[in-house]
Amino acid sequence: MTIIINALILMGVLGLISGTFLAFAAKKFEVKEDIRVAVAEKMLPGVNCGACGFPGCPAFAKAYVKGEAKNDGCLPGRRAGVPDKLKKLSEIKDDDLNAMGEKLGGDIQKIIEEIMK
Ligand code: SF4
């Protein structure tokens, strides 16, 4: 009986140590997403058609934020006003966008609504 209790205690201690280490590692090595890329991607139609010359909307959003794509590069999004949305996004400074993200709890849709006001 004692051996079973010792095994359970050992398993509990190992689980606690492992959990603590994984929680620390997750926080330490967390990859923060660029909020500007996330907002740009959400502004796109999400068709992933490749008509912009990039292998999908996420790639186009990253390229736009880097300055490697024009705001009117998304052909399906032209009628939906994507160029205007992307232009307004590019006019916002990083600090203002980050502050807006914190204020709105990181809700990308609300950030877009705030930008388009
Ligand atoms: S053209 Fe527009 S909808 Fe198509 S992949 Fe590019 S960004 Fe996405």
Image: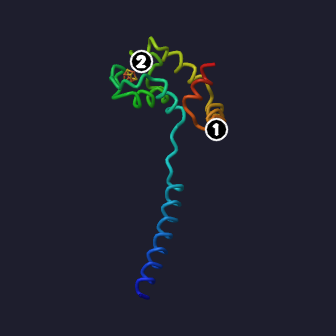
* Residue for badge 1: 102
Q: Residue at x 58, y 37 (%)?
A: 106
Q: As shown in the figure, which amino acid type bears the numbered disc 1? A: Glu
Quarter of the image where one finds residue 52: top left
Q: Position of residue 28 (x, y in %)?
A: 53, 56
Q: Please determine whether, in this image, residue 51 is positioned above or below residue 13.
A: above
Q: How many marks?
A: 2
Is the residue at mark 2 in contact range of ligand 1, meaning its CB lies under 8 Å from it? Answer: yes
Residue 21's disc is: none
Is the residue at mark 1 in contact range of ligand 1, meaning its CB lies under 8 Å from it? Answer: no
Quadrant for ligand 1?
top left
Between residues 9 and 43, which one lies in front from this camera angle? 9
Q: Position of residue 100 (x, y in %)?
A: 64, 32
Do labels 1 and 2 touch, CB within 8 Å?
no
Between residues 59 and 113, which one lies in front from this camera angle? 113
Dot 2: element? loop
Q: Position of residue 78 (x, y in %)?
A: 44, 13
Q: Residue at x 49, y 14 (%)?
A: 81
